[in-house]
Each structure stands twice: as structure tokens, then as C-alpha cells.
Image (cartoon, rainbow, N blue to C red):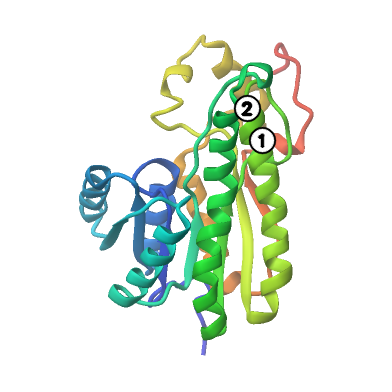
């Protein structure tokens, strides 16, 4: 009897911060693969609009308002989700922020806020979700890392510190939880065409030219390009894959780049 290794039917997936952008794209991918989608946000209005968007795609989604950095709120929300929707089989720690400020000019509280959302929050949410996974004998955890888990860039010191830490937290989660049949991995997106990057993706903009030139695929990523990696790491196909970061970056990390005048 053949088994569809990528079928997520019957699975419940919690994707934090999936009211828009890359998180929503990954959630849609999991939903189309059969998973029941649960998304969170700190804004009820944004969550309501997101649920409507999922419904337009013929996907049933459940929304919960809670702050991923609030330990007690997360604990309460996870219990509520598992009571109202069902046990969480898949967790994608996607919620994140970035503050583009040179290190020497950055306020300590701003640095700490980025660390709290991008690094501490995945620790908090995973800690409460994994308890149920351990009891049930399996699960999938995906941390959304970044190319800044590997590289530095001007003005994103806090973000790079958080994402570099998240890479190592992912490896340590895998080390501790693999014996419970829980696979913990990460996805590191490259540069993607989103509403946030729209102003700098116009022809002639220096950063647009830099990204096109720096990326072997010679284009920005489409948010849907993340769906394959998300489905793979959420499915039986990755049952012996643990502690890895899959970089969905069009090949940026594979190359030193090329001169701007090279074809």
C-alpha cells in the first residue's frame, strides 16, 4: 500500500503570526496539503481579515489572539486551542519583527524587544506545545530562521543576533526531543516579494538591483516558494530529518556573488 508522504490530512498546524505575509503563504500550503490551520495574532481585527482571506481560498482556519512573548498567555492559548480544535501536530514559529537601526544608535530596549519576539517567543511557544507532542509520541516543529542566521548586514544587528540564536535553539530542540519522535527544523527565507519589500523592488532601485544580482535565481522569492519546504518539514517525508535549516533563498548562500556588470 502506497503512502502519500506529503499528505497532512488529519493534522492540526499552529502557525504564529500567520495573519499576513510569509506566514500566511506557508499556512495556505499546509491547508492545501490537508492540515487544519490555526493562526495567531495580537490584533483581533487583523485576525478576522486573515480568516476571511483563508476562506476565500476554501481553507478553514481558526484564529486566536495572544502575545507569543507572554508566557502565561501562551500557556492558556495552547490549552484552549487543544480543547477547542484538537492536539497540535505541527508548530511553525513564524511571528517576528525587525528594527533596522545601526548597533551604535540602537536603544537597549529595542534590541531586547527584537530578541524577545524572534528568539524568546519560539522558546515559549515550543515549550508549551511540545509537552503534548511528547505525550502523544510525535510532532513537527519548524522555526522560521533567516539568511541572517548565517550572515551579517548593516543595521540588522538585533535581528541577526536573534535569528542566529534561533538556529542554535533549533538544533538544541532537535537534540532534546528527537527521542520522542519529534522533528525540529528551520526554514531560512531569502529575499521575498511582499508588501513590505514592494517599495524597494522597483526597477532602478539600488537594493532591487543588488538582490537580483546577488541571487543566482536572478529574482525575488514568491511567498508561495516557501510552501514546499513547509509541507516537507511538516510531513512524514521528513521523519528522519532533524536539526537542519533549509534555506529557501534562490541560491544566495551558495555563492560569493558576481560583479554587477557580469551577465
Q: Which residue lies at the image location 62% right of the left edge and 41% below the top edge?
A: 146
Percent x, y of residue 204: 51, 9
Q: Nearer the viewer, residue 217 or 60?
A: 60
Residue density around tag 2, few if under 14, some if 14–19, many if 20 or more, within 10 Å = some
Q: CA distance from mark 1 to mark 2?
A: 6 Å
Task: Please tell me whether residue 142 is drawn above or below residue 18 in the rendered image.
Answer: below
Q: Nearer the viewer, residue 54 or 180?
A: 180
Q: Which residue lies at the image location 45% right of the left edge and 42% below the top edge?
A: 223
> Of helix, strand and loop, which one carries label 2?
loop
Task: Please tell me whether residue 146 is drawn above or below residue 263 in the rendered image.
Answer: below
Q: Which residue lies at the image location 79% right of the left edge and 28% below the top edge?
A: 256
- Would you say 195 lies left or right of 157 here? left
Count of marks, rendered view: 2
Q: Nearer the viewer, residue 85 or 208?
A: 85
Q: Would you name the residue on which mark 2 appears?
A: 156
> Of helix, strand and loop, which one carries label 1?
helix
Q: Would you name the residue on which mark 1 appears?
A: 160
Percent x, y of residue 131: 53, 76
Residue density around tag 1, few if under 14, some if 14–19, many if 20 or more, within 10 Å = many
Q: Disc 1 vs disc 2: Cβ atoms closer than 8 Å?
A: yes
Q: Which residue lies at the image location 53% right of the left edge and 59% below the top edge?
A: 124
Residue 232 in sight: no
- Would you say 15 lies left or right of 169 here? left
User: Farthest residue in the right direction?
Assistant: 256
- Would you say 103 lies left or right of 62 here? right
Q: Quadrant of residue 82?
A: bottom left
Task: Please tell me whether residue 170 is drawn above or below residue 98 in the rendered image.
Answer: below
Percent x, y of residue 203: 48, 13
Amino acid at each position: 500500500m502506497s503512502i502519500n508522504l506529503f499528505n497532512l490530512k488529519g493534522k492540526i498546524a499552529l502557525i504564529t503570526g500567520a495573519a499576513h505575509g510569509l506566514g500566511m503563504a506557508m499556512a495556505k500550503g499546509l491547508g492545501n496539503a490537508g492540515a487544519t490551520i490555526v493562526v495567531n495574532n495580537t490584533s483581533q481585527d487583523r485576525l478576522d481579515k486573515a480568516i476571511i482571506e483563508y476562506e476565500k481560498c476554501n481553507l478553514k482556519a481558526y484564529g486566536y489572539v495572544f502575545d507569543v512573548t507572554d508566557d502565561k498567555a501562551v500557556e492558556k492559548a495552547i490549552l484552549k486551542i487543544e480543547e477547542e480544535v484538537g492536539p497540535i501536530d505541527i508548530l511553525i514559529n513564524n511571528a517576528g519583527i525587525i528594527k533596522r537601526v545601526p548597533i551604535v544608535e540602537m536603544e537597549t530596549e529595542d534590541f531586547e524587544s527584537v530578541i524577545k519576539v524572534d528568539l524568546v517567543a519560539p522558546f515559549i511557544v515550543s515549550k508549551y506545545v511540545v509537552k503534548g507532542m511528547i505525550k502523544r509520541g510525535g510532532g513537527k516543529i519548524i522555526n522560521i530562521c533567516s539568511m541572517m542566521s548565517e550572515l551579517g548586514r548593516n543595521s540588522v544587528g538585533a535581528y541577526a543576533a536573534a535569528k542566529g540564536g534561533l538556529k542554535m535553539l533549533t538544533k538544541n530542540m532537535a537534540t532534546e526531543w528527537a527521542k520522542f519522535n519529534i522533528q525540529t527544523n528551520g526554514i531560512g527565507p531569502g529575499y521575498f516579494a511582499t508588501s513590505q519589500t514592494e517599495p524597494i523592488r522597483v526597477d532602478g532601485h539600488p537594493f532591487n538591483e543588488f538582490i537580483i544580482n546577488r541571487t543566482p535565481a536572478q529574482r525575488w522569492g514568491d511567498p508561495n516558494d516557501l510552501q514546499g519546504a513547509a509541507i516537507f518539514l511538516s510531513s512524514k517525508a521528513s521523519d528522519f530529518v532533524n536539526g537542519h535549516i533549509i534555506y529557501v533563498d534562490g541560491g544566495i548562500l551558495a555563492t560569493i556573488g558576481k560583479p554587477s556588470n557580469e551577465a
